[in-house]
Amino acid sequence: MTQIQSEEIPCPFCGVGKITCDHIPSAWSFKAKRTKTLPGSGTASKSAEVWDVKSGCPNCGKSIDEIKKAMKEGTPPDKEKLKQRYNEIMKLKEEMKKEKK
Ligand SMILES: [Zn+2]
């Protein structure tokens, strides 16, 4: 059987609020000893790791759906920040090049 662990993780948006998740680790269903009802077929399949978000963020007010999406696709705010930082660095480099010439 898969084990469901209830965990508290920091909000992917603000990093301050704590959100409650049920964490279901990925597991090989083949190894489970409950294959009596499925005889013969020797295919092993690994279930995906699941984070089931149970609560929204009390700090920034993001909903369960928004947090779920963020966890699936990564956290957009951080990606944006990285992109912004990258652009800033590129700009600086360009300016430095210009000054040298
Ligand atoms: Zn939050």
Image (spheres, rainbow, N blue to C red):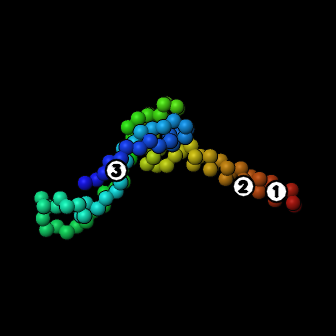
Query: Which of label 3 and label 2 is nearer to you?
Result: 3
Q: Which residue is mark 1?
A: 96
Give whichever of discs 1 and 3 has the lower sequence position. 3
Q: Amino acid at mark 3?
A: Ile
* Residue 12 seen in render: yes
Residue at 57% of width from left, 48% of height from top? 79
Q: Which residue is mark 2?
A: 90
Q: Amino acid at mark 2?
A: Met
- Label 3 crowding class (10 Å Cα cut-off): few <14, some 14-19, many 20+? some
Is the N terminus in the top left, top right, bottom left or bottom right quadrant? bottom left
Q: Which residue is mark 3?
A: 24
Residue at 49% of width from left, 49% of height from top? 74
- Label 2 crowding class (10 Å Cα cut-off): few <14, some 14-19, many 20+? few
> Horizontal placement of 51 versus 95: left or right?
left
> Horizontal placement of 34 versus 28: left or right?
left
Residue 7, horizontal then vertical, whole percent: 41, 44
Cα–Cα gap, marks 3 and 2: 41 Å
Give whichever of discs 3 and 2 has the lower sequence position. 3
Cα–Cα gap, marks 1 and 2: 10 Å
Instruction: Label 3: state its secondary structure.
Output: strand
- Circles 3, 2 touching at the beta carbon (< 8 Å): no
Q: Is residue 46 above or below residue 71?
A: below
Residue at 82% of width from left, 56% of height from top? 96
Residue at 50% of width from left, 42% of height from top? 10
Residue 63, horizontal then vertical, whole percent: 44, 33
Instruction: Label 2: state its secondary structure.
Output: helix
Is the C terminus in the top left, top right, bottom left or bottom right quadrant? bottom right
